[in-house]
Image (tube, helix red, strand yellow):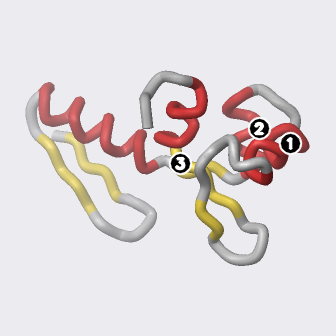
């Protein structure tokens, strides 16, 4: 059995290989990066990551003034893995 507790406090459970894989896929899509985390994820400078956000090249949400969050899904879309 696999149990994941999300940052918002919700809990998801799965039993069986297929269900567990589906849950892991969903959890990875919920991953959110700060700009610094995005820079590490893409192996670029922090300045380069800020440029991606500011220029609208990657989707993000603002969690307060200049407190950007970028989802794993947005990163994968930017990299061309997924079509938006």
Mark 3–mark 2 distance (CA, rounded to whole Å) = 13 Å
Q: Residue 71 carries which label?
A: 3
Badges 2 and 1: C-beta atoms under 8 Å apart?
yes
> Residue, x 59% and y 25% (percent of image)?
79
Which residue is at a point 34% across and 58% down the rendered structure image? 5
Label 3 element class: strand
Separation (CA) of disc 2 from disc 1: 5 Å
Query: In the drawing, does residue 42 fall left or right of residue 19?
Result: right
Instruction: Determine crowd level at label 3: few under 14, some 14-19, many 20+ residues with C-alpha closer than 10 A.
Output: many
Residue 18 in the image: state x and y as whole percent: 13, 27
Query: Residue at the left extreme?
Result: 16
What residue is disc 1 on? 46
| Badge 3 or badge 2: first in the primary sequence | 2
Q: In which quarter of the image is residue 75?
A: top right
**Image side of residue 71 versus residue 39, left or right:** left
SS for callout 2: helix
Camera-side residue: 76 or 33? 76
Mark 1 or mark 3: whose residue is earlier in sequence: 1
Q: Do the residues labelled 3 and 2 touch (CB within 8 Å)?
A: no
For image coordinates 20% across by 34% down, the residue present is 20
Q: Residue at x 31, y 51 (%)?
A: 4
Q: For residue 39, which numbered disc appears in the image?
A: 2
Check disc 1: other Cα within 10 Å, few if <14, some if 14-19, many if 20+: some
Q: What element carries label 1?
A: helix
Q: Work out how far the residue at label 1 is from the one at label 3, CA to CA, in angstroms.
A: 16 Å
| Quadrant location of the C terminus in the rendered image | top left
Q: In this view, does 21 lie above or below 7?
A: above
- Percent across and percent down for residue 17 are 14, 26
């Amino acid at each position: 059995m696999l149990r994941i507790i999300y940052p918002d406090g919700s809990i998801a459970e799965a039993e069986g290989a297929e269900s567990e894989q589906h849950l892991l896929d969903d959890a990875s899509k919920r991953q959110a990066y700060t700009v610094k985390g995005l820079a590490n994820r893409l192996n670029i400078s922090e300045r380069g990551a800020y440029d991606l956000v500011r220029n609208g090249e990657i989707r993000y949400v603002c969690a307060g003034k200049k407190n950007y969050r970028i989802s794993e899904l947005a990163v994968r879309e930017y990299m061309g893995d997924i079509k938006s």
